[in-house]
Amino acid sequence: MPAYEADNQRWSEVITHCDIAAWEIDPGSLTMKFSSYGQEIFKLRNTDSISLSAFLEKVQSPYIEVLSNHFGRLTKESKPFFDTIYLNDLTCIRIKGREIHEGSETRFIGTVEIIYSNDQKKPLASKLGISEGHYKLFFDFNPMPIFIWEYDTLKIVDCNNQALIKYGYSKEEFLNLNIKDIRPSEEALLVNSFIIEELKDKGGHHRVCRHVTKSGEIFIAKVLGYYVNIDGNNCSMELITDFTDQFEGEQQLLESVNELSDYRFALDESCLVMILNHKQKVEYLNLKFQEVSGYQYQEIVGDLPNAVYEENEALKDCLDAVTEGKIWRGELKGLKSNGGVFWVDTVITPFKNSKGKTYQYIWVGYDITEKKQAEESLFKERFLLRTIIDNLPIHIYVKDINGKHIVNNKFQYENFLSATSEEVTLGKTVFDYFPEEVANRMAEIDRQIIEGGQSSMNLEEYYYDANGKITWLLTNKVALRDASGKVVGLVGMTKDVTDRKHEEETLKNLNQELIKKARELEQSNEELEQFAYIASHDLQEPLRMITGFLSLLEKNYSDVLDERGAKYMYFVVDGATRMKAIIMDLLTYSRVGRMEEKIKETDLAAVVSDVLNLQQTLISQKGAEITVGPLPTLRIPVSPIIQVFQNLINNSLKYQADGVNPKISVSAKEKDAFWEFYVKDNGIGIPESSKDKVFILFSRLHSKSKYSGTGIGLAMCKKIIENLGGSIGFQSKDGAGSTFYFTVPKVLS
């Protein structure tokens, strides 16, 4: 047999002879395997293993949950345990459990040791083969307090010396007590209830209760009792263990566990936790880490941190620090399972054993993804803003409360301050760049803005450069405030408007010249209108004389005139008649816009009806067909609008081809701010070459021998409509009729 096998067998025999059993549990299947002595303790037949649930069934009910929790924490959290419990057969055992590592393998093992066996309820003297004297010696000199009491009378009938010491009585005093006397008064009534239960079983029993000493001190007693029959009387022999310190310790431990549980809950709710083993491989991720990263526990366990974190300089520094056993803090960029990223403000702490060797690394961090995204967004916004500011063709600057420049855009420092970079301008004031008089004026404006917290908009400033040339500036300045509203400086925007000022001066001179020309033109127009009015009015008198004498000549001497003379006479009379028509139209045209007529509500349907009545003879002669659509009522001067409709309808009747019956329609359409009117006919139309002459004064488009007229009517219409604030136009095709349209505002200015 090899030496190591002999050595193992020797130690196995030592453990067996010391009444110590061994066990091991498989965390996957939760199956427990026992040594031969363990099989004997738990009465396993023909097998060395049972399930954890079957093992727990062998334990008294008060200990099942406690023991189940022990095994759960051992297998899941590597927490060792040590406890004393009772089996269903009243055997009292001490059980231990812990984790061990063998290379890469982790095992969960433990021991079981019997403290008291139920076989001891048999008389020890007979079991051990000793005399009653020896048993009495064992009872009296036992280091644990022991006393015996009767079930019927509750009287204490015997006790050992340790019981007297514990409770503080003399033996005579103690034997005069009953079992209720050593219980607090408020618990004395509970005695009857457990007596009934114990008499049913007549076996071993145990309980934890409060006992009171002679001095009134109360302690927690763990009672281990056995039914005995003494001289035919039912009695209970009880061994007492002062459980006070252990109980209080357990209470404190429970409180600590609860507190730690609260801490862990708070940690898990708010922090990302990752644990690495001594090889820096992941062995634990909390739920928060899994939720943020998107990875499941089983996907990451056994991997290095770079399975979760981006390999960059920060991760390298982190791993270097923890390898050296140092605490590290910094920001790490994580890679989500779905391809996204997350950021963690991380503190990594190495845990060392008693030999100073690191066995575990705890990574605890806060999710700062939103913060990093906000910082990145803010950086982009600042970069964009700075890019825009630096490329605007105006001077932009920021000053502190002392007037020192803290920001200058590129246009400012290059074109205004003649600097090569912004840095050389920072901390300087207007006194570093402008003459003292100009700088004092600018500094005073800055002071008023900073002290008053107000703005100065469209402020025009000027100064003379070294060559004596004036420079004009247009400036806006606003107070700069911090988050609390306190003024901490000002922001200025300045534009060089020297060229604009020169242009304004030039424009001002031009405007004055235009005003002068307009006045001269207005005076000239007035003189022309005056001349036209006077000329047309004064020409009527000699024209009346000529036409009068021509009429007398035709009446008295027509019989003496030959054919040629009569023809000449016709030409003279016709010319005089046309001259009169021209003079009258010219007089009417000159009056347009000069004679003020009151504005009143005018029904344009009635206006058109009156015009048609005046043209009734010509309408009948031509056999004209005229349709009039719905027309509005407007507040306008009456006479001018009558003149417009009369001229347009008369032209539609007059300018017709031979043998064609005129078809004329008058209509209107409402627009947003005006009405548009239409006069449409089927007349001869207007040649393309003549369209630009239609509204020119005295412009005739056809022979006077075929179509009468003076060439003033349409020019008059144009002048009337434009005076009303409207416009006039037409659409026409030679030989296919014409449509004249004009607009009149709904409200005249």
Image: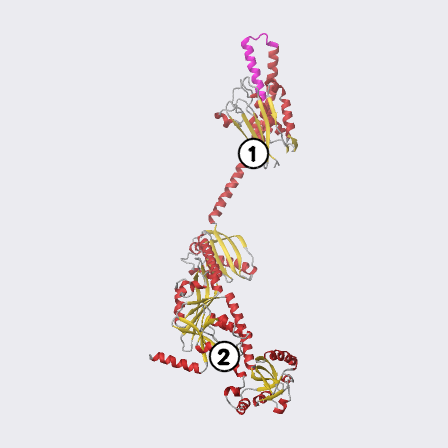
Q: Residue at x 61, y 14 (%)?
A: 551
Does residue 200 lie above or below 160 as drawn? above
For the residue carrying disc 1, how many other residues have a C-alpha within 10 Å: few (<14), some (14-19), or many (20+)? few
Q: Quadrant of residue 577?
A: top right
For the residue carrying disc 2, how many other residues have a C-alpha within 10 Å: few (<14), some (14-19), or many (20+)? some
Please give the label number shown on residue 181: none
The residue that disc 1 covers is 523
What sort of colour scheme is used for the picture? secondary structure
- Verify whether residue 61 appears in magenta: no
Q: Secondary structure at mark 2?
A: strand
Between 514 and 493, which is closer to the camera in this rendering? Answer: 493
- Verify whether residue 575 appears in magenta: yes
The residue that disc 2 covers is 94
Does residue 519 lie above or below 118 as drawn? above
Predominant secondary structure in magenta?
helix
Hey, what amino acid is under mark 1?
Gln
Q: Is residue 232 visible?
A: yes
Position of residue 619 measured from the top left corner of the image (x, y, whole percent) = 61, 20
Position of residue 168 measured from the top left corner of the image (x, y, whole percent) = 60, 89
Quarter of the figure with the C terminus: top right
Position of residue 266 measured from the top left corner of the image (x, y, whole percent) = 52, 68
Q: What span is in magenta? A: 556-582
Does residue 736 lie above or below 247 as drawn? above
Q: Secondary structure at mark 1?
A: helix
Between 50 and 526, which is closer to the camera in this rendering? Answer: 50
Quarter of the figure with the N terminus: bottom left
Q: Are marks 2 and 1 in contact (CB under 8 Å)?
A: no
Position of residue 561 in the picture relative to residue 495 (left or right):
right
Q: Nearer the viewer, mark 2 or mark 1?
A: 2
